[in-house]
Each structure stands twice: as C-alpha cells, then as structure tokens.
C-alpha cells in the first residue's frame, strides 16, 4: 500500500510555498515528490529511538553581539531602495493589503 | 443549560528599548524616523545576510520573566516561524517555539486573583505597512525601520474574566516593565501591542482574537463588548465564528477584520544560523541580582509602613514621580496633621502639584479644613425643609447642604469636613 | 607555458620576483575567457574593474617590498561563484529571480580576498540557487566540462571548476552544501577543498542549506588550496556559526608529510553498487599508492551512504524552502514566478517536510539519523586519522542525463553527503581518468583537521601527476 500517495497535495504545497505551478507541471511534481518520499522513507529502517536530533553541527552555544549600534552596515535610504522595482518617497511599494494586522 | 464563563487570554508584545536591533547593529529607534534609513542587509532580509542575537535583549527578557515570577529555561533557542507578508522581509520571523527563554509566571490583581502566565519569549519585530493611494492606485507602503527590533512576547493563561481585569493586568504589567526600564510600554506609539483571545468558555472550542487596540481603556471596552456579543450569539444557539476582530471606539463595538478557514501552518524549525543558548544557575542568579525593587514590593512597603490601602499604594507606585514626591513629603504632611493616606489621595487626585513643595500646598489645604461653624449654622438655618428630610432619615440629602456650604465659601471649604460638621450639628 | 596556466604558487613566485606583472597575468586569463567562455559558459559576468585592480596590485608590488606579507594573494586573478555577493557587480545565483540584482554589500569571503590583494575576474555559473550537481539547472544554460563538451562539469560550482580546469583563472571559489565543491573538482580533474562547516564565513553567500553550506576553494594544486583557505577562513562576527578557533595552518608543514603509520579508513559501503568499474579500479590504485607511501589502510563499515541521501534531501530541502522565502520581488529581484523548475521542486518538498503533521516523520527523523552519522564518524576518527574513498560513483555524466530525475543532485552526491551533514572537512584530488574524463579521490577528516587533510592530499599529489594533466581546449 503506497502510503505516500495521499500525503502529497501539490496545489496546497504550491500555495504554502508561494510558488506558481501550472496544471501541467503539477502532475510531474506529484510523481517526483512521491518518488522522493519513497527514497526518504527508507530512513524508517534506521533505529533512532536512542538519539536526539542534531540541528547544528558546530557545538557552539551562546553566541551573541553586544547591544551597540554598528553604523558600518547601516544602508542609506537610497541603497536600501535601489534594487526595488517599486518605491515611493522612501518606501517600498506593494499592492494594497486590505486586512490590517 | 449552557455554562458561560468569560474566558480571556492575552498576548502582549513589548518592544525593548535597546540601542540596537535584535539580530543586527541597526539603531532600534524607529518612531518618527525617515523611512528605510535604519536598515542593513540583515533586517532588510537581503540575500546572504545572517542574524546574530543581541545579548542585552536576551538578558532583559530573562529579567522580565524573573520579575513576573517565571522560570528561566536552562536551555533555549530561536526558531523560524514562516509566513508570507510584505512587512516580513525574510518570509519568516525569528521567534521562539518550544524552548522559550522563560516559562510560567504570574501577576496578582488587587483582588488577590492570580493571572497565570504561560511564557515569556523573545522575537524580532516586523516592518510597518502604511496604506495609501499613490498615482490613483491603492497601495501599501513598507518601512523596514522597525524590522528586527527586539520584541518580547508575554502570554497569559486564559485566566482573565473581564475587561476590567484585563485593564488592571495591563496596568500592573506596564508598571513592572517601566520599573525595569526595558520599555516605555506606549500603546499609542506601538511599543506595547496586544491581542486578546476572548471566548465564553474553553470547552466551547472557539475563540475570537481582538487586535489593534491602542489604549487600556479600549482594551477594556472591546473585551466587554465581545463578551456580550458572544453571549447573545450563544444564547441564541449559535457558536461565534473563530476570527480576528478590531475595535471601533466610535461605535464602541468590534468588527470582523479577518476570517481564516484553516490555521496558519508556520512550519517552525530551529533557527540554523543561531547557536542555542544555555544558562547556568549562576547566569540566572546574576540576572536576578540586577532586578530593581518591583512595584508590588514597593506597594507592600507602603502598606506596611504607612498603613495605606493596597489599591492606593498600587496607584502611588505606578508612577515614579508620585512615589518620590510622596516619600519626600510624608513627614512634612504628618507635622501638618495630614495623614499618609490623605497625602496619597491628594497626590492621586491631582489636588497637589508635584512641581511645587508640599509644605505650602498642604498648609493652604488644611486651612480649608477648618470650616467656619457660622457657615454651617447658616446653611442649616436657611434650608429647614432639607434639614427636616435629613432628620426624617434621608441622610443622603446632606449632600445638598454641603453644596450650599461650598457655594457660600466659594469652593474653599473642605467638603468632607463640611459634611462631617453638618451631620454632627444635626445630631444624625 | 602561458601565464594563465600557472598554479597559484607559481604565479605568486613570478609576481614576487617580477618575472611578470599582475596585469599580464590578468590579461592572459581574460584572453582565455574570451576564447573559451562561448564554448564552456563558465562565466556569467565579468568584472569591468579587473584590470584596474591588477594595475593597483602592480603598483603595490613595485613600491612595497613587504607587500606580499600583508597581502598574501596580491595580484592573483580568480573567479568567484555567483552566489557570493559582490557590491556593485551583478550577483544572480544563476537564477532569473536575481537577473538584475546588484548587491549593496560584500560577502565576507569576497572582502577578505579583496584585502588579500586578489583580482576578481568575474562571477561563475552554477546550478540555480546551488540546486544541483551538474550546473544544468542554471537559468543561463549549463557549463560544459573542459575535458569533453558533451559532459557536465559537475555542480553546483561547475562554472568555477571549469574555469580552473581550463586555465581561465588561477583559482576559483565555490561553495559546498553537499558535494558542490568536491564533486565538480572531481569531474574537472582539479583540487577542491570543503572546509569544516563554520570555518569559512557564510555572510553574504546566498544561502542554500544553512546548516551545511561551506564556502571553499577550487584550485590546480593542494598547496594552492591551502593558500586560499588561509585567507578566507576564520571567525566572522557577522556569522554566528563561525568557529572562534584561530586558523593555524602552517603552509610549510604541508610539504613532505610522511604517511608512515597514518591510519586511513575506507568505508566498504562507499563502493556503491552504482560505482563504475573503471572508477573503482582507479580508487583501488590510489589506495595502493597511499599504502606505498606508508599509510595503513583498513576497510571499515559505515552507515550506507544511500541513507545519507534521505537525510540530506530532507534537511537541505527544508532549509532551502525557508531560505528562499525572502525572494518576493519587493525589495530586490523579480517575483516568485521567475523561479525555475528545480527550485520549485526543492522548495515544495522542503515545505512539505516541515509542515504540520509531517515535521516529526520527515525533518526531525532526518536530523536524528544525522546524529547517527555524526556519532559514527566520531567513533571512526578515534581510531583512524582520515577516511578515504571515491568522490562520485563515476566520471562526469553527459549533459542531459539529469533530466526527469527528481533527486538527481542528491544521488550523484551521495558519497559526500555523510561528511557534509556531519560538517566535516575533505578534499577531492585527481586520481586518474576514465574514458578521458577525470576522477577524484575523497580524503576526509574530522572537524578542524584541514591541516592533516591538506597534508595527506599534498603527499598523494606529490607522488602522482594526475593534477598536472590539462584538457585540450582547441574546441572545434
């Protein structure tokens, strides 16, 4: 029984990831994801009951910076906006967002 | 029979008054600053930029937790919280998920009721959106000056039962945070923001989120309105819809802002760019040692030393200027036969100016206290029918006579003393 | 020999004794780029200020006798993978999303190379967003392998590797998430070093998998790689995952290290079923060579690298889905409709692995197996100095072989994924040819063992001449 089949909802994943996927592409992605999951499902064969997860391999802890203003990296307004396709009076512009949060 | 229990939990966001932002060295100041002038690759979410956490923000969060009776977690970390929104430059917010800096805590209201806290954690703020019409088109303008400012989130258990309790909770919380000097907690400037989750009972499995409230007064009104709105619906057999609502102070009612079919999937995972945090008992003790005397302790001190009613003591400690003035003038007041409680009342009710020395002001006020007995007798003589009413048992009518005393003394008399004297004279 | 064919070490020697100038060296490279790039497509963007930098270097060399002490790579022309931000010079990560992106700040690696006096020739082609092992997912066309134009150079640092192999530059910089430096080095017949994770700053490198990304050099020799590593490695306050350990590499110690008694481990599972027979034979020969030099080689057993495919795929794609969330076209670049097929593939799978209800079974499970891999390496390195093996199951694949393979990159890189997810350091050094295509030997050490890894790699290179071979580039 292919338990991965029901898990993949390409249009949901596209929405979640804000990726544009045409109906043509969707079928291809679904097949691909299912094949990928088949490979990664093999990890179930390994017993990990006694180990924790490793999210970072450095072993570093407590890395901070002091609460000081660092002018060297602050961008001028011009530099901050120079790559935007749409800007107005010092602001970035996006289509109107109608709900207030 | 449907059991309805007003159930309110709050999520309070507090901007920390650090010099620099949470994950970069940009100035954290953003109020009335030209747009997009306090940004850098990190807080602008440029390709390749990486976050490095602000130590002071971490320390202050622990301090806040300790001041609120929370337990500092010995291990903590940051996590990524994903959602798309124009004011969130990286497409995720660096926040804390399952290992916040502090867990638990509580705050006691004057009634003695305890509001329990779930957690106190640290995250970064988003940019700001301004809605405008540019070139005939409706657009949203984005300013990232605020993006990356350190934000502490304080979450309560759903222990709050009314708008009044919510307001009191916020006032006490603000007093603590101001004492710690970690934030100016200004709801109008936005350095303190909150959401109230309101329902008529946890078992009813719904809750309404109320947001965008910019004063404690509005918080109280909005919650009370929501409770009554929800009660009406429930009594009519309907379940209130799970949604986000705003508050309109003009109509004094809440309105729908956003309705979501499904909950947001934030896809939390541990922030790979920031090593985890580990705290020893020594580290935590060092933070605790830095705690100043908190409002609750200061209030208790006043109650113990000066016999002030607790509520009055709370009000006095809420503002540093009031408390200082009180402490400096309580001796003088006593020599002028003004009790500490009376002095406190005068301060709270703005009957005394904090900019001028107490001695002079109190002298004038105590002079007012000796009401001319002649005037008392005059008023009694002039109002026989009111006197008759009072003697017949309607003691509330003495208020009218007090008014007359005030009229004759052109407001100079001490109303409380006048009332006492009147009642004495009339032997009631 | 033309100046562009020199190694870094030779070029520095020549500049120091003023045998030639940086301008001459740079012009030689630029000429070769002009000649070969139309066929190889290694470079995406050339640096218009390259000659200016070379002239400034020459001025320094002429006027300051101690110039090379303070600027150890003074006057050397190099190529930089296009995922490293260069202020003022277009940076695209080979994606149309960043088609017109001009960064406003420098990557730390780029800044350090500038301080060291280098001359940036240009930005090299890569798999778009580093998603791949062949450079074929680039939105600007694939790069071709200088040894055979019908084959890929590997990826994702394919442009950098091809540029070094074809002598279009003296050295290049790439980045490895799992296999993206060592893989192309292997397929292009050059030396690649993947430093320990956290050794070289990721600040200003367009992120792929935050927990494994490691910038590293692609060079003509091991000695060259050591020189570049010395300049780029070291703590960076802008990257919280960099190690505070000072870089104590002694270039002198790299020469003439005796392999006598060195204990080397060969994981039998790395000789995978997919291995090409001729490649396996070359690896066997390389092991014999090492034994001949005095090393003691034992076969050991490690977790089958096929499992690493699962670990790496899940961890990497999850982190990728997160790291690419910032590309919304608002502050820079084009909107998300400009993402290519492979980026969509990886981002969506990554979102899935992190999503509610699946996080534990996928992302978290992968991170647990990651722990198993790490622990196993730790155990291995208590007994052995280094782990040796093949880099890829075979030589460079043909262009187009990756088509319709949803996990192409992750499968090609399977032998490098274990050391990558563990954050270890390792090299790929040339060890022979299969049907005219180069093949490499993987030499891996524990974290911060760059000194030993480079020394053993240098010893192997000193006893062989595979690295001296160059492709014939008189393409029709």
Image (cartoon, coloured by chain):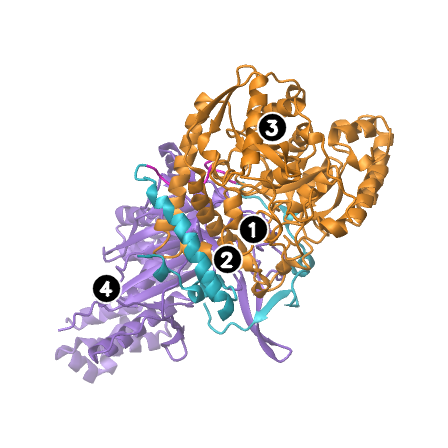
Chain colours: A cyan, B purple, C orange
Chain letter behind tag 4: B
Q: Is residue C102 magenta?
A: no
Q: Is residue C28 above or below residue B87?
A: above
Q: Residue at x 20, y 76 (%)?
A: B396
> How many C-alpha atoms fall within 10 Å of the one at disc 1: few (<14), some, or many (≥20)?
many
Q: Is residue C70 above or below residue B41?
A: above
What distance separates the C-alpha of mark 3 from that of mark 4? Answer: 58 Å
Q: Residue at x 44, y 21 (%)?
A: C383
Q: Are marks 3 and 4 in contact (CB under 8 Å)?
A: no
Residue receiving disc 4: B202
Q: Nearer the viewer, mark 1 or mark 4?
A: 1
Q: Are marks 2 and 1 in contact (CB under 8 Å)?
A: yes
In the image, B256 versus C449, the foreground residue is C449
Q: Which residues are magenta?
A: A51-64
Residue receiving disc 3: C247
In the image, B241 versus C161, the foreground residue is C161
Residue receiving disc 1: C131
Residue receiving disc 2: C345
Q: Is residue C162 above or below residue B414?
A: above
Mark 2 or mark 1: whose residue is earlier in sequence = 1
What distance separates the C-alpha of mark 2 from that of mark 1? Answer: 10 Å
Mark 3 or mark 2: whose residue is earlier in sequence = 3
> How many C-alpha atoms fall within 10 Å of the one at disc 4: few (<14), some, or many (≥20)?
some
């Amino acid at each position: 029984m292919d338990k991965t089949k029901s898990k993949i909802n390409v249009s949901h994943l596209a929405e979640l990831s804000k990726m544009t996927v045409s109906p043509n592409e969707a079928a291809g992605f679904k097949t691909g994801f299912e094949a990928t999951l088949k490979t990664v499902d093999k990890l179930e064969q390994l017993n990990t009951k006694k180990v924790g997860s490793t999210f970072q391999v450095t072993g570093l802890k407590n890395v901070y910076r002091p609460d000081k203003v660092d002018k060297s990296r602050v961008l001028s307004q011009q530099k901050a906006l120079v790559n935007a396709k749409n800007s107005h009076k010092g602001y970035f512009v996006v289509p109107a967002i109608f709900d207030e949060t | 029979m449907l059991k309805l229990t007003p159930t309110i939990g709050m999520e309070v966001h507090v901007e920390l008054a650090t010099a620099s932002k949470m994950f970069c060295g940009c100035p954290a100041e953003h109020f009335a600053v030209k747009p997009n002038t306090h940004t850098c690759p990190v807080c602008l979410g440029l390709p390749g930029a990486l976050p490095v956490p602000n130590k002071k923000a971490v320390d202050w969060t622990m301090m806040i937790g300790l001041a609120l009776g929370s337990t500092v977690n010995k291990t903590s970390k940051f996590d990524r919280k994903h959602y798309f929104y124009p004011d969130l430059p990286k497409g995720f917010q660096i926040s804390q998920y399952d290992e916040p800096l502090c867990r638990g805590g509580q705050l006691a209201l004057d009634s003695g009721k305890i509001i329990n806290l779930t957690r106190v954690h640290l995250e970064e703020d988003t940019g700001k959106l301004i809605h405008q019409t540019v070139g005939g088109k409706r657009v949203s303008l984005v300013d990232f000056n605020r993006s990356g400012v350190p934000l502490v989130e304080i979450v309560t258990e759903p222990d709050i039962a009314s708008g009044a309790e919510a307001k009191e909770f916020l006032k006490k919380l603000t007093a603590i945070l101001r004492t710690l000097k970690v934030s100016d907690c200004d709801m109008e400037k936005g350095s303190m923001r909150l959401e109230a989750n309101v329902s008529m009972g946890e078992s009813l499995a719904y809750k309404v989120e109320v947001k965008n409230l910019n004063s404690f007064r509005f918080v109280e009104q909005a919650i009370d309105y929501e409770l009554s709105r929800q009660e009406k619906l429930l009594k009519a057999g309907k379940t209130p819809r799970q949604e986000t609502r705003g508050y309109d102070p003009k109509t004094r009612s809440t309105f729908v802002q956003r309705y979501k079919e499904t909950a947001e999937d934030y896809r939390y995972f541990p922030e790979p760019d920031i090593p985890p945090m580990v705290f020893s008992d020594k580290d935590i003790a060092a933070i605790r040692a830095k705690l100043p005397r908190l409002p609750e302790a200061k209030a208790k001190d006043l109650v113990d030393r000066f016999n002030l009613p607790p509520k009055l003591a709370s009000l006095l400690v809420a503002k540093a200027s009031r408390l200082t003035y009180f402490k400096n003038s309580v001796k003088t007041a006593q020599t002028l036969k003004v009790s500490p409680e009376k002095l406190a009342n005068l301060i709270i009710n703005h009957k005394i100016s904090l900019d001028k020395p107490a001695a002079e002001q109190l002298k004038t006020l105590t002079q007012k206290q000796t009401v001319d007995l002649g005037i008392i007798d005059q008023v009694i003589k002039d109002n026989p029918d009111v006197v008759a009413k009072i003697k017949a048992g309607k003691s509330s009518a003495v208020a009218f006579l007090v008014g007359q005393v005030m009229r004759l003394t052109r407001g100079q008399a001490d109303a409380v003393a006048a009332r006492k004297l009147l009642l004495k004279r009339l032997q009631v | 020999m033309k100046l562009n064919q020199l190694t870094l070490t030779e070029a520095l020697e020549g500049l120091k004794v003023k045998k030639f100038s940086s301008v001459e060296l740079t012009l030689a490279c630029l000429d070769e780029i002009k000649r070969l790039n139309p066929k190889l497509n290694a470079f995406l963007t050339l640096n218009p200020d390259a000659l200016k930098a070379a002239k400034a270097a020459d001025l320094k060399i002429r006027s300051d006798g101690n110039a090379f002490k303070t600027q150890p790579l003074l006057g050397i022309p190099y190529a930089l993978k296009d995922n490293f931000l260069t202020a003022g010079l277009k940076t695209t990560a080979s994606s149309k999303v960043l088609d017109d992106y001009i960064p406003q700040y420098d990557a730390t690696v780029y800044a350090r190379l500038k301080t060291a006096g280098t001359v940036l020739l240009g930005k090299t082609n890569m798999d778009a967003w580093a998603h791949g092992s062949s450079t074929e997912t680039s939105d600007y066309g694939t790069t071709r392998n200088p040894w055979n134009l019908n084959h890929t150079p590997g990826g994702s640092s394919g442009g950098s590797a091809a540029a070094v192999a074809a002598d279009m530059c003296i050295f290049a910089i790439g980045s490895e998430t799992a296999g993206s430096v060592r893989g192309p080095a292997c397929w292009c017949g050059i030396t690649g070093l993947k430093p320990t994770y956290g050794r070289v700053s990721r600040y200003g490198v367009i992120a792929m998998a935050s927990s494994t990304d490691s910038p590293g050099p692609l060079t003509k020799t091991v000695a060259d790689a050591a020189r570049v590593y010395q300049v780029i490695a070291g703590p960076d306050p802008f990257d919280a995952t960099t190690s505070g350990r000072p870089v104590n590499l002694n270039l002198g110690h790299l020469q003439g290290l005796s392999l006598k008694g060195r204990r080397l481990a060969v994981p039998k599972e790395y000789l995978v079923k997919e291995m090409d027979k001729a490649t396996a034979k070359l690896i066997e020969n390389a092991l014999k060579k090492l034994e001949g030099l005095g090393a003691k080689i034992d076969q050991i057993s490690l977790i089958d690298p096929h499992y690493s495919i699962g670990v790496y795929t899940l961890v990497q794609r999850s982190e990728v889905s997160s790291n690419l969330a910032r590309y919304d076209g608002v502050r820079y670049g084009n909107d998300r409709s400009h993402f290519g097929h492979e980026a969509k593939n990886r981002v969506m799978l990554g979102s899935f692995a992190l999503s509610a209800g699946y996080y534990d079974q996928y992302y978290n499970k992968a991170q647990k197996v990651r722990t198993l891999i790490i622990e196993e390496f730790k155990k291995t390195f208590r007994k052995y100095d280094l782990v040796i093996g093949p880099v890829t199951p075979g030589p460079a694949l043909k262009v187009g072989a990756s088509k319709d393979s949803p996990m192409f990159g992750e499968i090609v890189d399977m032998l490098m994924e274990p050391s990558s997810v563990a954050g270890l350091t390792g090299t790929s050094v040339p060890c022979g040819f299969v049907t005219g295509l180069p093949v490499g030997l993987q030499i891996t050490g524990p974290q911060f063992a760059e000194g030993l890894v480079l020394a053993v790699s240098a010893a192997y290179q000193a006893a062989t001449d595979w690295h001296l071979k160059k492709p014939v580039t008189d393409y029709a």
